[in-house]
Amino acid sequence: MKIAPTEEGLYGDHLLRHWSILQDNPELLKVMRQVVTVNDPVRIDAGKASRLRNMGLVKYTGNDVLPLCDLYRLYFRDRLRVQ
């Protein structure tokens, strides 16, 4: 589990693909930062939430979103340098 949320881990290529897509879209990157910064569901723009969900990065909780899994939360927190 220690290396799972890294590019060295089993899902490294998968994570890196998502990271690359987010880097190419600063608006999505900004809202993904909001999502991984907190541990509770967060309300973001509905269109961007839908795009992140379609990428498989978030899940809905009512009208709010959470990372789909802790792997994404940990990986993107590290990549975005979120404490």
Image: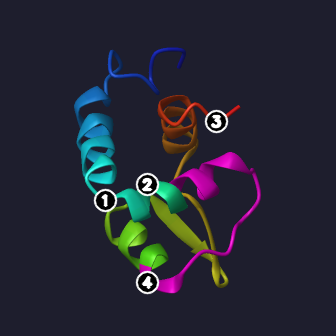
Q: Is residue 81 left or right of residue 22?
A: right
Are the residues at dot 2 and dot 1 in contact (C-beta closer than 8 Å)?
Answer: yes
Q: Quadrant of residue 10?
A: top left
Residue at mark 2 to residue at mark 1: CA–CA distance: 6 Å
Are there few (<14), some (14-19), or many (20+) residues within 10 Å of tag 1?
few
Q: Amino acid at mark 1?
A: Asn
SS for dot 1: loop
Residue at mark 2 to residue at mark 3: CA–CA distance: 13 Å
Q: Nearer the viewer, residue 30 or 40?
A: 30
Precedes in sequence: disc 3 or disc 1: 1
Precedes in sequence: disc 4 or disc 3: 4
Q: Quadrant of residue 35?
A: bottom right
Q: Is residue 44 magenta?
A: yes
**Picture coordinates of residue 9, whole percent (x, y):** 35, 19
Precedes in sequence: disc 4 or disc 1: 1
Pointer 1: what residue? 25
Pointer 3: what residue? 82
SS for dot 3: loop
SS for dot 4: helix
**Picture coordinates of residue 29, whole percent (x, y):** 43, 54
Pointer 2: what residue? 29
Residue at mark 4 to residue at mark 1: CA–CA distance: 14 Å
Are the residues at dot 2 and dot 4 in contact (C-beta closer than 8 Å)?
Answer: no
Q: Is residue 83 left or right of residue 51?
A: right
SS for dot 2: helix
| Residue 47 numbered mark, or none | 4
**Picture coordinates of residue 77, whole percent (x, y):** 57, 36
Are there few (<14), some (14-19), or many (20+) residues within 10 Å of tag 3?
few
